[in-house]
Image (spheres, rainbow, N blue to C red):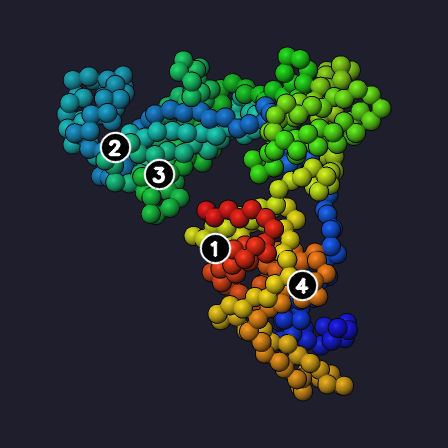
Amino acid sequence: MSNRDVKTRRRIPGSGLAAALVGALLAVPAGRAFAVQVQDLVRLKGAESSKLVGMGLVVGLRGTGDGGAFLPAMRPLAAVIQQLMDPTAVAIELKDAKNVALVTLVATLPASGVREGDRVDVHVSAVGPAKSLAGGRLFMIPMTGPVPGSPVYAFAEGPVTIESPDAPTVGVVKEGAQLTRDVMARYLDSFGRITLVLNEANASWPTANNLANLINGIVSPDGPNLAKAIDQKNVVIEVPTYERSDPAPFISQVLRAYVDPTQIGTGARVVINERTGTIVVSGDVQISPAIISHKGLTITTITPPITPSEQNPVRDSRHFVPIDPEKRGGAKLADLLEAFNQLKVDAVDRIAIVKEIHRSGKLHAQLILE
């Protein structure tokens, strides 16, 4: 196929797609690998997000709250009223209260840590029979760590935003919690070591061991081994003594290092979410030579005459797509999916085709259906 042929076909809408598909699949050399950074395969132990929790009251609802008969909500409301006004009025005030709802609170702190005064979102969920939290406001409440006896880390307050009309009893208070103390990430253990935790998709003994060997070659090529795989998911690295007072450069060197995924055995996976029509490809997923024929899939190719012309092409319509027809090897699933984009194949048909390729043994990857 000449370059002129390809250009001519692209100028004609809806044509030349089979040739574009085959060309895309054959253009990738066999055995090609793309270097990835270590930080794309692991996370640093200590750099995990943490949670703050609490229970509070959303007030100001328009008759969609828990109601006066729901005592778990009325008791804390009564305590607030007793503090702020005449205790004898409590029973009268709460008799027909429907503008208050008892809610749980959860705030996620970023993995990088937070400082006193920072703000984070608070997610609220109704506990009782409330019908909706729309229009309500979270009454100020302290938030603690999830462990019993944990100190107060933040105070939460603010208007509730309903994110989905299908879930009116769940909402979020944007930047509703203000931190009252620092929460800092700790990366070095008491022995001056950092731990790389492999992503679940990459965790295996061969991957962990090979990754440790590659890191040793990067950070200590002529010295003692600093990295060691302690199991299939964790690689421990001893930070040199002279680096421990300022470990950021050493940690950055490790995480930003490039490695060849074929050398560390990262697994190829294809994750399909049939509900959303999403296909996620990880690793260098290859496909053996195959021919695809699927309902509703029509491929039109053009065979130009001696003098190619947009007005006078010769078209050849087919109902199959050859993948790597010359059996050179190296056809990639990513290229097939890109060809589907050109062909405007819908999500349902894409998923069906990928599943059939896997069922026939031509898809060289683990297939995960969600």
- Residue 16 location, quadrant: bottom right
The reply to whether residue 267 is visible in this rendering is yes
Mark found first going from the N terminus, 1 or 3: 3
Image position, residue 1 (x, y; %)? 75, 73
Mark 4 = which residue? Answer: 324
Question: Looking at the picture, which amino acid does disc 3 mark?
Answer: Val
- Spot occupied by residue 164 in the image (x, y as percentages of width and height): 37, 46
Image quadrant in which you'd find residue 146: top left
Amino acid identity at mark 4: Asp
Whether tag 3 and tag 2 are in contact, CB under 8 A, the answer is no
Report the mark closest to the observer, 2 or 1. 1
Query: Is residue 161 left or right of 233 when viewed as pictured?
Result: left
Q: Nearer the viewer, mark 3 or mark 4?
A: 4
Going from N to C along the chain, the mark reached first, 4 or 2, is 2
Q: Secondary structure at mark 4?
A: loop
Dots 4, 2 in contact, CB < 8 A: no
**SS class of the residue under badge 3?**
strand
Q: Which mark is residue 7?
A: none
Residue position for label 2: 128
- Rounded to the nearest angstrom, the CA distance separating label 4 from label 2 is 59 Å
**Dot 2 lies on which element?**
loop
Residue lying at the far right of the rendered structure: 222
Check disc 3 and report the residue beneath it. 170
**Which residue is denoted by mark 1 in the rendering?**
277
Q: Amino acid at mark 1?
A: Gly
Amino acid type at circle 2 is: Gly
